[in-house]
Image (tube, grey):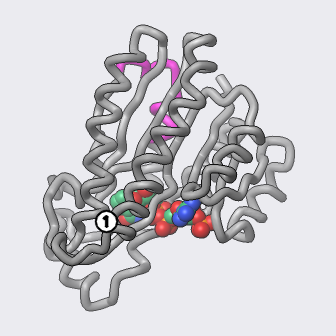
């Protein structure tokens, strides 16, 4: 069964890999980006009848409205947009804490609120959030990011309990350190140190994440609900 999917953060490292697989599988994907629309051009060219690109800053209410108005009959929401943030908890500026939580946590809440009524009408829907191993472990210097990613775990569990009877599942994927995306922001030195903390001693193959998303969209995944699914090489 082909879905109509809104994928936020489609222009990001993981977003692109997820989008490619979902498009190969024949789904229609609204590809959201913020400042890198060019990253999506190859997919839009390759799948013109199955894609629509939407640029929106999730910090801006008017942009959110544009995004809402640009979509139709969405039955799958995947929120892969996100920003990282570094700094000890007692030093993180209020504005930074708010910004990180706005993009990572408030935005998916607002998006869910918008799309849930249609999913309920159709008695079918899938919502997928992205948390992180950082929220599960407690890593110094990540308070704003970890707080936002932990909040998604509680939100998805609650929404799953509210929406399960309506045929809608809400799950959270918690990646470890994957081989694309946000990892580009760390130095080679840090990367070497990081690998020592991963039982599998390698960064995660991002295709694991795309395959997991694809599976959650299937009808036969309807009993997987309210879960935080870790993909982290054994870290947690
Ligand atoms: N990659 C990993 O190892 C890893 C590990 C754990 C968790 N995660 C989580 O998985 C998700 C995807 O990660 P990723 O590695 O693909 O991240 P990424 O490569 O850094 O991509 C981030 C995405 O968020 C979008 N974005 C940034 N600021 C935005 C804003 N103000 N409004 C709207 N969109 C905005 C970016 O859009 P533009 O590029 O167009 O500006 C981009 O599409 C994130 O939620 C991340 O926290 C990733």
Image spot of residue 200 (x, y percent) = 21, 64
Q: Residue at x 54, y 24 (%)?
A: 116
x 16%, y 73%: residue: 90
Quarter where residue 232 is shown? bottom left
Q: Which residue was labeled with disc 1?
A: 177
Which residue occupies the foreground of this view, 167 or 194?
167
The answer to whether residue 29 of the structure is visible from this angle is yes
Looking at this rendering, what residue extends furthest in the front direction? 94
Figure check: 64 above or below 1? below
- Classified by dominant secondary structure, the portion drawn in magenta counts as helix
Q: Is residue 65 above or below residue 116?
A: below
Rendering coords of residue 109 (x, y %): 46, 39
Residue depicted at 52% across the width and 30% down the height = 113
Across and down, in percent, residue 79 comes to 50, 46
Q: How many marks?
A: 1
Give whichever of 94, 52 is nearer the camera: 94
Q: Is mark 1 within 8 Å of ligand 1?
A: yes
Q: Is residue 72 left or right of residue 173?
A: right
Determine if the magenta segment contains residue 224. Answer: no
Q: Which residues are magenta?
A: 213-223
Q: Is residue 146 left or right of residue 102?
A: left
When asked about the image quadrant of residue 46, the answer is bottom right
Taking the spot 43% from the left edge, 19% from the top edge, the residue there is 222
């Amino acid at each position: 069964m082909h879905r109509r999917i809104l994928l936020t953060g489609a222009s990001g490292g993981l977003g692109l890999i997820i989008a490619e697989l979902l498009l190969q599988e024949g789904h229609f994907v609204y590809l959201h980006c913020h400042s890198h629309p060019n990253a999506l051009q190859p997919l839009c060219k390759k799948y013109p009848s199955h894609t629509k690109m939407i640029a929106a800053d999730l910090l801006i209410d008017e942009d959110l409205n544009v995004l809402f108005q640009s979509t139709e009959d969405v039955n799958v929401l995947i929120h892969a947009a996100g920003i990282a943030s570094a700094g000890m908890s007692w030093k993180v500026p209020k504005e930074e804490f708010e910004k990180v939580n706005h993009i990572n946590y408030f935005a998916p809440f607002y998006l869910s609120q918008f799309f849930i009524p249609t999913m309920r009408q159709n008695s079918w829907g899938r919502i997928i959030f992205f948390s992180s191993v950082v929220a599960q472990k407690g890593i110094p210097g990540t308070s704003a990011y970890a707080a936002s990613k932990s909040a998604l775990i509680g939100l998805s569990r609650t929404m799953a309990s509210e929406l399960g009877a309506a045929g809608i599942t809400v799950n959270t994927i918690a990646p470890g350190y994957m081989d694309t995306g946000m990892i580009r922001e760390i130095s080679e030195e840090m990367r070497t140190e990081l690998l020592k903390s991963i039982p599998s001693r390698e960064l995660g193959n991002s295709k694991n994440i795309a395959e997991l998303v694809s599976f959650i969209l299937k009808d036969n995944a309807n009993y997987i609900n309210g879960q935080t699914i870790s993909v982290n090489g054994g870290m947690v």
